[in-house]
Image: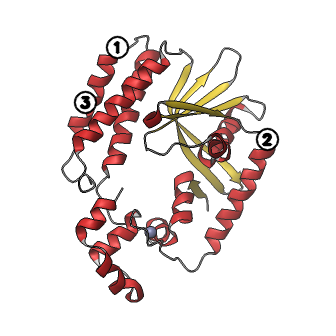
Amino acid sequence: MVEVFSHSKLSLYENCPEAYKIKYIDKTFPELPQSIHAFLGSAVHDALENLYRMLISGKVLDLDEVIEYFAKSWHEQYTLDIRVPTGEKVEDFFNKGVKFLVDYYQNNLPFSKDTIELEKKIYFPIEEGIFIVGYIDRLEKHENGSYEVHDYKTNDRMKSQEDVDKDRQLAFYHLGLQDVFGENAKINLTWHFLAHNRKVHSFRTQEQLEKLKEETLELIEKINKTREWPACGKPWCDWCSYKKIHGTIDKNQGEESRKVFTLNDSLGKWM
Ligand SMILES: [Zn+2]
């Protein structure tokens, strides 16, 4: 039997073991409407993907065309059940997306022609029978033969150099590319923090990658041995919020949580 893990699957276990169990073991995770933050993220990713897809085919889009594409796909895909925090306005999120794209466009002109793949799937064994899966937003190959992984972040969180140097998600991409291009491939990692109009670069030594593999295998072993799955109880946890609203909480914590959270409170904190 083959086991498959991703950075986000591992993160879910780290954040809320009960949510992990419901989603990946019981496979009964409720179908929740998308949050406006996730919707904004995917609309911005799509617009940048389109920008580079056009670039690969030889056409440099104007800024207007990039924004037009974003606005069109926003309006086509927006649905009324998307979760917007209480007191916040949908158009502010739309405007945020426009600002991200304007800043990105101006910051990255003239666009490098080195992009070779978009939304590239990585899939590699971290040990026999255990695979890691992920998707690289954009992959470049430079003239000197080195590769550069680009990842766009649309949330408000700005990571420090220290944070990105320890980041698991992009290090997995590094390992995935080594699996394809060989251990000697030179690979650099770049984060685009769009909400901060900043780029941060990082790279991993072979030693760091080996350590990451070890830690990941330890985590997977821990997950596979887990028999008790505590809920995180945090208001921003989709599963924990869902339980509070629908009352499907176990008897011990049920009454307490229902007192504290009303429907609107929870929806407001859902993100
Ligand atoms: Zn939780």
Identify the mark at residue 105; answer none if there is no mark.
none
* Image quadrant, ligand 1: bottom left
At x 59% / y 46%, what residue is drawn? Answer: 169
> Label 1 amino acid?
Asp
Q: Is mark 1 on a helix, strand or loop?
A: loop
Is there any visible trace of residue 226 in the rendered image? yes
Of the two numbered discs 2 and 1 on the same chain, state the one appearing first in sequence.
1
Of the two numbered discs 1 and 3 on the same chain, state the one appearing first in sequence.
1
At x 30% / y 66%, what residue is drawn? Answer: 266
Identify the mark at residue 206; answer none if there is no mark.
2
Is there any visible trace of residue 53 in the rendered image? no
> Label 3 amino acid?
Ala
Q: Does the residue labelled 2 lie within 8 Å of ligand 1?
A: no
Q: Residues within 10 Å of mark 2 (few under 14, many from 20)?
A: few
Residue 97 appears at what percent x and percent y? 33, 34
Disc 3/disc 2 C-alpha distance (Å) = 43 Å
> Label 2 amino acid?
Gln
At x 47% / y 74%, what residue is drawn? Answer: 231
Q: Which of marks 3 and 2 is in front?
A: 3
Of the pair 14 and 260, the residue shown nearer to us: 260
Quarter where residue 2 is shown: bottom right
Residue 263 appears at what percent x and percent y? 24, 69
In this rendering, the answer to whether 69 lies above or below 163 is above
Quarter where residue 99 is shown: top left
Residue of label 3: 71
Residue of label 1: 62
